[in-house]
Image (tube, rainbow, N blue to C red):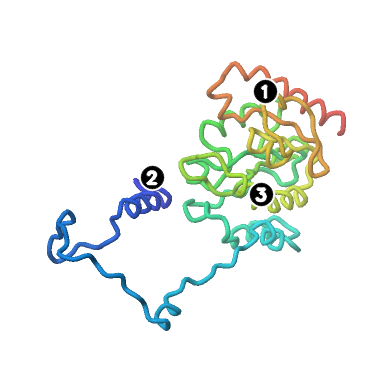
Amino acid sequence: MESALDYYAAEALLAWQVELGATEAILDAPVNRYETPKEAPKAKVAAPVAAAQSAPVKQVEVDAVAEARKAVKGVSDLDGLQSALTAFELCELKRGARNLVFADGNPAARVMIIGEAPGRDEDREGKPFVGPAGDLLDRMFGAIDMGRDVPLSKDAIYITNVLPWRPPQNRDPKPAEIAMLRPFLERHVEIVAPDVIVVMGNIACEAVLDRRGITRMRGEWAEAFGKPVMPMFHPAYLLRQPLAKREAWADLLSLKARLEDTA
């Protein structure tokens, strides 16, 4: 059952109360905030020692992208990469998510699909592309005789996301979050070593190709991570815009032809 108030919603409510001035606990007796004081309050001057003790500690800024690169350095397999992601503490999304959503499908597949970020269903199950969008994805690739549960690598697909943790309220990932986790995605591609990458949706295009505009980019082959890349509409978009399934079918046929040419 979904929590009625998640971490980020609770944090936002607390910040709102503090902004309104609700920063005190309940007192023993009521206080009339509208009563005029008999004399103006005098400013309190803290003693030098006390002031020094209460001085805020200077926080050292951390380069999250550099730390991510350190985290993946020397990682050579998927188990190690998943462990590195699990241990990575600099992404705030981790605090509000239920599960790390790492990957699904056959790691030996020729096709690696990169989605955007987990939604509610993915966060609950810890797998990418489940629920209605996942069902449509499976039907789309099943139409060209491919799937995530296919044992033969030539017909299999392997699926992951740009972000492994669900953003609060399913909001779009922030550029800083994409940049922070890109080293993990890049190493993921290096380990799986697919023949072709499929990026689904604007967020995936931004993370992999450093561009947005899926309606213009879809169906046009590009290159990233040393691999051919096919941008496609995200299944969630196709559920909202069924007429776009015609373009998605054309992209699937282009993908199939590319695989047959390079077999």
Residue drawn at x 18%, y 66% is: 39
Residue drawn at x 49%, y 40% is: 170
Relative height, residue 99 to residue 235 (above, below): below
Q: Nearer the viewer, residue 193 or 155?
A: 193
Q: Nearer the viewer, residue 85 or 60?
A: 60
Residue at the spot of label 1: 248
Pointers 1 and 3 in contact (C-beta within 8 Å): no
Question: Which amino acid, mark 1?
Answer: Ala
Mark 2 element type: loop
Mark 3 element type: helix
Q: Earlier in the sequence, mark 2 or mark 1?
A: 2
| Total numbered labels | 3
Instruction: Give the label, 1 or 3, closer to the camera.
Output: 3
Q: Quadrant of residue 50?
A: bottom left
Relative height, residue 82 to residue 237 (above, below): below
Question: Which amino acid, mark 3?
Answer: Ala
Residue at the spot of label 3: 179
Residue drawn at x 71%, y 47% is: 107
Instruction: Give the label, 3 or 2, closer to the camera.
Output: 3
Relative height, residue 206 to residue 72 (above, below): above
Q: Earlier in the sequence, mark 1 or mark 3?
A: 3
Measure the alpha-carbon separation of dots 3 and 2.
29 Å
Q: Earlier in the sequence, mark 3 or mark 2?
A: 2
Mark 1 element type: helix
- The numbered mark at residue 2 is 2
- Image position, residue 46 (x, y; %): 36, 77
Measure the alpha-carbon separation of dots 2 and 1.
33 Å
